[in-house]
Image: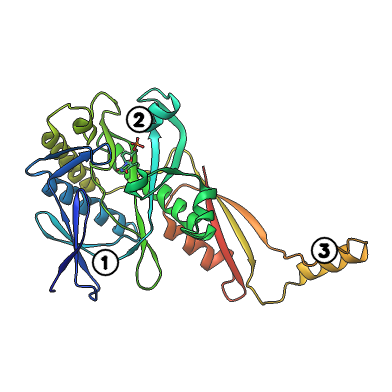
Amino acid sequence: MQTNTIKEGKAKKFHWDGVSDSCELEFKNTLTALNGQKTEELEGKGVLAANISAKLFEFLNEQNLKTHFIKKSSDNTLVVQPLTMIPLEIVVRNYAAGSLCTRLGFKEGEKLKKPLIQFHLKDDALNDPLLAESEILYLEIVSLEQLNQIKNYALCVNWLLTTLFEQVKIGLADFKLEFGFDKAGNLLLGDELSPDNMRLWDNFDSNQKLDKDRFRQNLGHILENYQIVLERIYLALAKKDIQTPAVPLKIRLYIKPQAGLLDPTGRTLTDSSNRLGFTEVEAIKAGKMLELELNDYRLNLIEDLCERILVSPAIEEYSYEIVV
Ligand code: TMP
C-alpha cells in the first residue's frame, strides 16, 4: 500500500492512501500533557503503547465489540480500518482522579458509586472543552440514537477492560475513547487504548500509578510501568475467562412498530382520545419497554437476544440503553 501521512497528532501519525480499506497508525515516542504544553520524547514509549493497544483491541474484537484494529504491522504500527472520526472524546471513570478531583473536589482514589461517562469536544483551539449531552445534540455532532449507541459501547468496553485488568490486580480508574464510522456507516471504536489515555493503578491503589500520570506528575519510571501493564495484560489474556459482573447489567429495551406499518394499539388510543374530547391528540404510537437484567455486558449478546427472541425484526424496530 502506497501511504501518505494524512494526519499527525501529538502521540500518533496516521498514514493512508485515501482509497484502501486499511491504513496505518504509527505510535510516536512523544509524551504530552496539559494540551501539549508539556512534552517529552521517550525512546520506546511508542512501541509499548502500540503493543498494549494491539492486545486490548484484539481482546475487544474477540468479544465481538467492533474496533478499527486489524493487525500489528511493525513494532510501533498497527493496521487499522480508516474511519470518519467523531470529534468527541468519551471519558469513562470508575474511580476519582484527574479533572474530576480538580473540577469537583473528589478525593483521588475514591471509588465511584457507578461508572461516570463524560464527553469532550475534540478541538485543540478550544482546549477540548467538556460537553453536555444537550450540546452534543444541539451541535449535531451525532444523533440521539448514535449518542446512545456510543454510551452503550463505552460501558461495554468499561466492563470488559475492568474485568480483564481486575484479574491481574490492576484498577482501571478511567480512560478516554474515540469512535468513528466505517464506510458502511457502522460505529467502530478507534484511536488507541494505552496507558497514555487510561489511568491504571496497581493493586487498585492510586499511589501506585502505571500510566501517563507518571509523566504528568513527574514521577519517573514511565517505561518500566508501561512494561508492567503489557506483561500483566499477557497474563490476564492467558486466563481467558471473563468474570460475571458483581451487579447485573440493567438494560431498557424499547420496541416499536416499524415506521409506516400498521399500529392498531396506537390507532385505537388515538381514536378513543379524540372521541372523549381530547381533540388535540393528532397521533399516538404504541410500543413497549422491557427491562432486562443480564450477567454479561456483551453488546452482541443483547442484540442476539433481541433479534432472535424479543423483537420481530420484520415488523418492529428496537433500541436499548444500559442503565447505570
Ligand atoms: P481527565 O481526568 O484529565 O479528565 O482525564 C480522564 C481520562 O481520560 C484519563 O485517563 C486521561 C484521558 N484523557 C485523554 O487521554 N485525553 C484527553 O484529551 C482527555 C480529556 C482525557
> Total number of numbered labels?
3
Sooner in the amino-acid sequence: mark 3 or mark 1 = 1
How crowded pointer 2 is (Cα within 10 Å; few <14, some 14-19, many 20+) is rated as: many
User: Is the CB of mark 2 within 8 Å of ligand 1?
Assistant: yes
The residue located at (23%, 48%) in the rendering is 237
Image spot of residue 65 (x, y percent): 36, 58
Image coords of residue 285 (percent x, y): 72, 65
Query: Secondary structure beneath disc 1?
Result: loop
Q: Nearer the viewer, residue 107 or 57?
A: 107
Return the mark for residue 97: 2
Identity of the residue drawn at 67% across and 59% down: 288
Task: Give SS at disc 2.
Answer: loop
Q: Quadrant of residue 233?
A: top left
Query: How far apart are labels 3 and 2 at the CA level?
Result: 50 Å
- Which residue in the structure is indicated by mark 3? 281
Q: Circle 1 sits on which residue? A: 81
278 up-or-down from 196: above or below: below
The numbered mark, 1 or 2, whose residue comes first in the sequence reads: 1
Colour pattern of the rendering: rainbow
Which kind of residue does numbered mark 2 sit on?
Answer: Ala
Quarter assignment of residue 225: top left
